[in-house]
Amino acid sequence: MSVEAEDRLEGAVSKLEDLIRTRSSKSDEGLSHLQSVLEDLEQAGAELEAHNEQLEETKTRVEHERRRYQEMFHFAPACYMQTDLHDHITDVNLAASRILRVEQQRLIGRPLVTFIPTAERKAFRVQLALVHDGQELHSLRARIQPRDMDPIPVLIDVVPARDEPGQIVGYRWLIREPASERSLLPGDRARRAHDLLEAAPMACFLLDREWRLRFVNPAAARVMGRKS
């Protein structure tokens, strides 16, 4: 409620209370007073309704921006994820799911450290301690352990996520492969793309110009009820 509408409503209620309390013997004066109160209440109600409409429009815009951000986050080509204060995954995008070879929903709640090779976890926790102190880490060299694969080298950027008062409420992660990994030969890139499609948790398939299937990954095969 706006301040003006709130003041008007409180004034109208005060007048009404005075009218009930005094119970004026002059009917004309009492009727005039009541009419003034009703007009104030009506105007306050109209202002309140307009204010509520503005709030609803603002809520709709905020929700639209939130959905747009979520779509950009989940479908971004880079690997993004968020963790809580205990380093458990709270959100993860599609690219990160693919590189870890685990479906997005199954990653939620998992400790991030479980995707670090066992022998390297102690050193990784030392770096996490710096982040917990509020520091940012950029281009941290590490290795991650995808499911059913050998560890792969990555560069990690992590920054604290803060609430309105500035308190740390979690951490935001960007995971990328070093330049040497990105500079693969065409054949290597094709094999990497094939492996990613094979491991993707969602259905993926390729069609030629005649609409004939040329590739079906295991997830798509399950949907189609056939073998890949």
Image (cartoon, grey):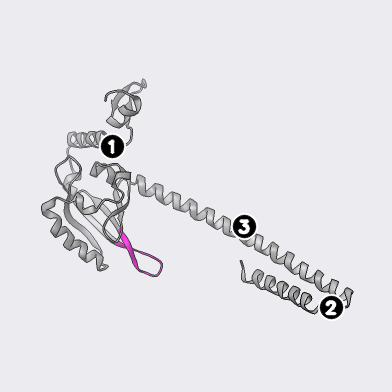
Task: Please state the horizontal and vertical placement of residue 13, each as a whole percent of the image.
Answer: 71, 72
Q: Which residue is mark 2?
A: 24
Mark 3 crowdedness (10 Å alpha carbons): few <14, some 14-19, many ≥20: few
The span from disc 2 to disc 1 (Cα, nearest Å) is 80 Å
Tell me the distance, in whole angstroms, between the alpha carbons under discs 2 and 3: 39 Å
User: Is 50 inside the magenta-drawn segment?
Assistant: no
Magenta stretch contains residue 164: yes
Q: Quadrant of residue 192?
A: top left
Query: Start and end of the magenta stretch?
Result: 160-171
Please, what is the three-letter code of the amino acid marked with disc 1?
Ala
For the residue pair 125 and 153, the one nearer the viewer reads as 125
Q: CA distance from mark 1 to mark 3?
A: 44 Å
Along the line of sight, the residue nearer the viewer: 76 or 204: 204
Q: Which residue is mark 3?
A: 53
Which numbered disc flags the more N-terminal residue, 2 or 1? 2
Instruction: Evaluate if marks 2 and 1 touch, with contact meaning CB atoms under 8 Å apart.
Output: no
Which residue is the site of mark 1? 200
Q: Amino acid at mark 2?
A: Ser
Q: Secondary structure at mark 3?
A: helix
In the rendered image, which quarter is residue 20 located in? bottom right
